[in-house]
Image (cartoon, grey):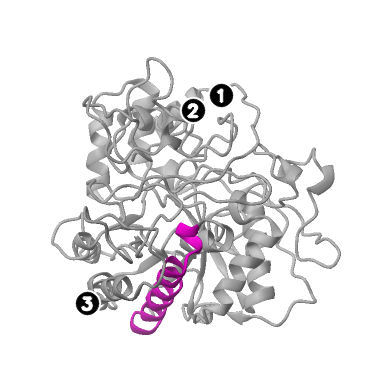
Amino acid sequence: MEEEHGHVGIACGGHAGDTAVASTPAAKRQGSGDVASRRSMPHFWTFVIILAIAGNLAIIFASRVDSPSIARDRTLPRALKASGITGNPFEGQVLYKNPVNQAQFDESINSAFGPVKASLKAMRDVPSAYWIDVKAKIKGNTERSLQGILQDASSKSPAEMVVFIWYDLPNRDCKAKASNGEICCKYNPDRTCDYTWQLECNDGLNEYKETYADPFIEVLQKFKGKVPVAIVVEPDSLPNLATNTGNPRCGGAATRQAYEEGIAYAVKQLTSKTPWVAVYIDAAHGGWLGWQNNLVGFMTILKDMKLPMNKVRGFAQNVANYQPLGEAMCPYEPDSGTNRNGYCLNGRHSSEVCCADPCSLAAEWNPANNELNYAQELINAAKSVLGIDAHVIIDTGRNGVTDMRKSCANWCNIRGAGAGKPSTTNTAEPAIIDAYFWLKTPGESDGCTATLPSGEVCPRFDSDCQSIDSIGSAVGEPRAPEAGRWFDYQVKQLAELAHMN
């Protein structure tokens, strides 16, 4: 979806489409932004050759980033412990690798050579999340469905932990130029959503509850005690309500009802009927909600929804996005009268590694110049507004390179991106960051070019996918497939420029 910040917009990543066989859904995007300087991008040949020798050991031991422990504002209220789950739900678990994703990697491995091939082999063995973005993916016996994946994961010894993305709200993708959502508050004759109709969403919510949420919960309940599960709830939705109310597609009464009541129902069902599931609510990323007014607005929405936040583990960051993780979390030095960390603002400490700012966010008074710093902002805001001690997981699938975009507002199939840190609990701040995790499988397209690889016109083309930073916009580059389809050219570039260790 697109986001408006009042300052600078930084691009979100894309999701896969419901017609795709891949695991992640359709596009989320952002508003306009400053131009980030484009630097030459190294080819990580030395790394990938080492990776070829090290094999699977390289993905087990992701590097640890040293940074100061998160500071707590002594003036904040005493916080409740978030989630009924004791400790980090990822710790000590064997993480599930979906054979469907591995088969996609095999296709690219078979036509790759040298260091790129070695890097692809390592990427193949990194666990990633699976998106349940249409009703048809809930039940079934294959590893393309919630039920089939849980059956497969529970058959392992020990049972392997699975991460799912819960994603099918009515009027989904309210700010997107193209959407693969299947549930609407009101349908057009072609079964797409009529976003101009904003009276109410009672029918859409009933459909969501009865045909998506309830069957999802029913399947999860069958695997109680058999397999560990984490779920990220509805990427982009509440961040859109926090920042895009000026857009009638997002701020209208029907969409707002769909998002607030739909997510409230999902979270309450998950935490009451499947309390062993670790629940993370999507919180976009630092380039979207990092500004203080945006972040407080987001937290206020959560508070007004009266969610059982003491039973929620925390938040998911950078889902399907390219925002830099950062090499360190900055010391917490809040501005007077606020919870905003002023450590990197107004040019302060600009030479320190934690203040590196490839998207010029700190220059626009956004302290979340990297996702580690955003995690700190998010946790402190949750404690201040919601009274909870929350935890986060961060998507690191495609943020191994930090300065590849001419404009950080661009999000679709970014040229020059590299795979990031493999899924791991070895994080910079384990007290608040449960895991780095590939919440979108690298190699799945963010969206199509106007013309598909087949030469046909893309029926769900988003003009953001022809940005100056998007693969397919330059002469000689291949056309991009629809969202969620395997993009061989892109995954090989992600492998070539990988920074996984």
Whether residue 415 is visible, yes or no, is yes
Residue 88: give its label: none
Q: Amino acid at mark 2?
A: Gly
Regarding mark 3 in the picture, which secondary structure is present there? loop
The residue that appears at 36% across and 55% down in the rendered structure is 129
Stretch in magenta:
248-274
Against 137, is 126 above or below? Answer: above
Q: Which residue is mark 2?
A: 416
Q: Which residue is mark 3?
A: 222
Q: Position of residue 164 (x, y in %)?
A: 34, 61
Q: Earlier in the sequence, mark 1 or mark 3?
A: 1
* 33 to the left or right of 426: right
How many angstroms separate mark 1 from mark 3 (CA)?
48 Å
Against 404, is 279 above or below? Answer: below
Query: Contact, CB < 8 Å: mark 2 with mark 1?
Result: yes
Q: Amino acid at mark 1?
A: Met
Asked whether residue 258 is drawn in magenta, I would say yes
Give the overall secondary structure of the magenta segment. helix
Q: From this viewpoint, which residue is outermost toward the right? A: 336
Asked whether residue 281 is drawn in magenta, I would say no
Categorize mark 1 by other alpha carbons within 10 Å: few (<14), some (14-19), many (20+).
some
How many angstroms separate mark 2 from mark 1 (CA)?
7 Å
Q: Earlier in the sequence, mark 2 or mark 1?
A: 1
Whether residue 348 is visible, yes or no, is no
Against 74, is 186 above or below? Answer: above
